[in-house]
Amino acid sequence: MKGRPSLWSWLWLLIGTLYFFLPLLATFLFSLRAKKGVLSLLAYQRVLQDPRFYRAFLFSLEIGVLTIVFSIALVVPTAYWIRVSAPQLRSLVEWTTMMPFVIPPVVLTFGLIRLYSRPPLPLTSTFEGTTFLLVAGYVVLSLPYMYRAVDIGLQAIDVRGLTEAAQSLGAGWGTILFRVIFPNLRVALLSGSFLTLAIVMGEYTMASFLVGLNAFGPYMWLVGRNKTYESAALSIISFALTWFCISLIQVLNRGRGVAQIPGAH
Amino acid sequence: MAAIRSEQRKLSLLLERQWVSSLPLLRWIAGLPYFGFVFFFMILPFLFLLIGSLQDAQGRWTLKNYMDLLEPSILEAYSISVRISLASAIGGGILGFLLAYAITVGGLPSGIRSALLTFSGVASNFAGVPLAFAFIATLGRTGLVTVLLKSAGIDLYGAGFNLYSFWGLTLTYIYFQLPLMVLVITPALDGLRREWREAAESLGASTLQYWWRIALPILTPSVLGAMVLLFGNAFGAYATAVSLTGGFINLVTIVIGAQISGDVLYNMNLGYALAMGMVFIMTLMMILYRFLRQQGERWLQ
Amino acid sequence: MRFLRFVPQMLLLSAWLLVACQPGATPAPSAAPPPAPGLEGLVKAAQAEGMLTVIALPHDWCNYGEAIETFKKRYGIQVNELNPDASSAEEIEAIKANKGSKGPQAPDVIDVGLGFAPQLVEEQLVMPYKVSTWDTIPNEVKHPDGYWYGDYYGVIAFEVNKEVVKNVPQDWADLLKPEYKNMVALAGDPRLSAQAQMSVYAAALANGGSLDNVMPGLEFFKKLNEVGNFVPVIGKQSTVAKGETPILIRWDYNALADKEALAGNPEIEVVIPKSGVIAGVYVQAISAYAPHPNAAKLWMEFLYSDEGQLIWLKGGCHPIRYADLVKRNVIPPDIAAKLPPAEAYARAVFPTIEQINRAKQVIADNWMKVVGAEVK
């Protein structure tokens, strides 16, 4: 099992906690000042009583889940294939995964709108089509994070060995992917999913031009413009809610039993 | 029994190799979904960028936009962007690694590990205006920590600290870089099997030798890959920088914003060329990464 | 004991239950005046379309929030609100990118800065329409054929947090005083934001410049930075309330909206400077590719009716038909009372389109060179 944690470990944890916690604390203290001269939860009340808050949050949450599913379905087989069959393509694929960082979001958004506003694929004529375009855009935006997380996860397990062992037992590619690779990528996939969810919940540009105030990012911006204390409260609330959703994912994951590499720490 | 097994193994490998080599196309089909998706939803919009950078406002072909990139203020913008991205990638990378170490090999309780991973998931995207305000509220002139320290006799701003500066912005960037590092590097640290350490120790290796000869070589490709991710993450950041710098720090993303989304009569084609410049720098970074990764893999041998 | 891991979540849940289950205020229903004669056909056509897509309309900007809600309730038309933060350039780009689309992300109407008006006509991005109150719109701020028309204007003012700033500055020269160290900020990046650029423009007028010479404005901010009074962060309501940017230079209507929203927590004063008062006009237009042209036209009729114009006035913006409203004495006294005195606006200077565009270009090009600190 693990060794006893050293003093260093606790020290780093302390420094890390302070660094993360203080800005949140500052925001929280500010959010309590909605009523003059008194510390109160008035700002939170106002936020939680706004029906648009729930609509926007749930909408973005749904989009987030869809994005995670598509992203994993796209990235894991690809990253696996790169390692096993086509290592010479690795640099090319990695380059494509880094491009979302340097294409300005406005350019990507308007590019997608331009491309998919006319036949043969007029996605933007309907709300459903526009939503699909939004999910596709988010898969692109989350690509760097999901790919890197999966790649590092694959690095940490002996992909070739596992593949060959499975094949010698007669497994086909589908079985290898679903029953051998996926379970061993549990932590990496969780990381990628967390990152993707957080991106979708906070994203502004693409959402604002495709679905406007229906999404959570634009809604947060709107509140932030004119309602100072509510905006600070909203930051804390969205932080807490995203934490809640992510913990939920972790709990559900934990219940399925651990398929970790034996002895690994 | 073992002989039969090894024969079976050789046979299946032979079959696989034959199957695979006799149908080279089949190997590439596996990549179709990915490349197809990337083509339709990333390459095609990217072409707008590429073509636009080679045109002027009337649609005629020109290289003028690229010539304009050589202007000193724009080169300076690239320089500052690269430096901030490097600073926050290395700073966030090292600190994130240490934190990830603490919760994996360092042996902190598993409750703390899952709390930290969850928190990292959220914090890694706590960026933009809310983060800028959080830091203003903490380390601005009227910020929580600034005021607390002042009452304890330490004058941060008097000593030269300024949130609205290169290092202030770097410090703010690290807020989302650090958790990103923790999240992506944890699986790599998990993969460091305890047996290797025990084996090394039983062979007489010291902790330093273990790290130098075994652990670091194994971790290097992952750490490099993670830092490249952090670099890209910071390089493309916009909202946080705009909110926190108010026109004083010259970052490429802000210059692009001025051309593409600004309120002055703008030059979109220059904006596209600027973005292509970023693509170029990112490509250089990927080449450097590939070189370092291959060196690292050689080290492993 | 494992449930202890869920303590934060349980706390959150109980806090939410406590806070959310309190009765909220019910909104008052809006009285519906009958539509102007001749408009019934337009109302029916608009309702048949059922939707209006707008862009770049923050709810607290000129009280657009109330305008949108009133329109929605009165006519039962759904309103899609795209990117409330869009700049004028992005609004135009949105029209261009959506040329082939009639979907919910193609904007019907836009509200852009005056400087962008010529481009709308040149590039054939808008369709002409003359509202029923067309004749009461001043000629200088509308296109003769109805392609675009001014909607409101405001002047650059100072938004001051009175609890941090004891001695409220009254003019540009005051801002340089040592008592305002680390207090003055702009509401945008002068390379990107019209509001920040107009602030520099106004400073120019107060410091020896003119509508054709904005360099003195840049020099002013350089001096402001050198004496240490300038805070290099983008100011907004939160930074004013926090005290980080207690003096914020921005449009008067935004400052008034902040004052109203903060409701004394803290106390805000909106000051129109004694010299250097520059007015900024925004214009409305209907997209040539609007998916819902009738809804768009009805929206315009609504905005340019007395009621619509007064909604803007409530938000602190001077509607373009202000002179007409005053002449006919239809401005309710309680709205008039919240505005700064009319004499302050008498000093306002209105630049032409060419002057605006030239000035903004000079400011955007020279900001970093003249004012920008060399960040190493």
Image: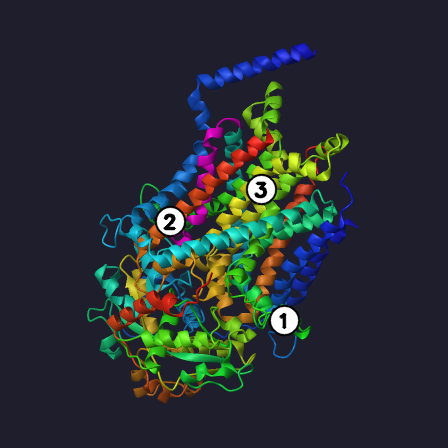
| Cα gap from disc 1 to disc 2, whole angstroms | 45 Å
Q: Nearer the viewer, residue C356 or B251?
A: B251
- Point out residue A53 in the picture as x, y percentages from the top left corner: 54, 61
> Residue at label 2?
B277
Tag on residue A32?
Answer: 1
Relative placement, left or right, of C116 versus C342 is left
> Residue at label 3?
B223
- Residue type marked 2: Gly
Label 1 CA crowd tier, 10 Å (few <14, some 14–19, many 20+): many
| Cα gap from disc 2 to disc 3, whole angstroms | 26 Å
- Point out residue B33 in the picture as x, y percentages from the top left corner: 45, 34
Q: Which residues are magenta?
A: A84-111
Question: Mark 1 and mark 2, same subunit?
Answer: no
Residue at 44 percent across and 46 percent down: it is A100
Question: Is residue B298 in the magenta section?
Answer: no
- Point out residue B281 in the picture as x, y percentages from the top left corner: 42, 46
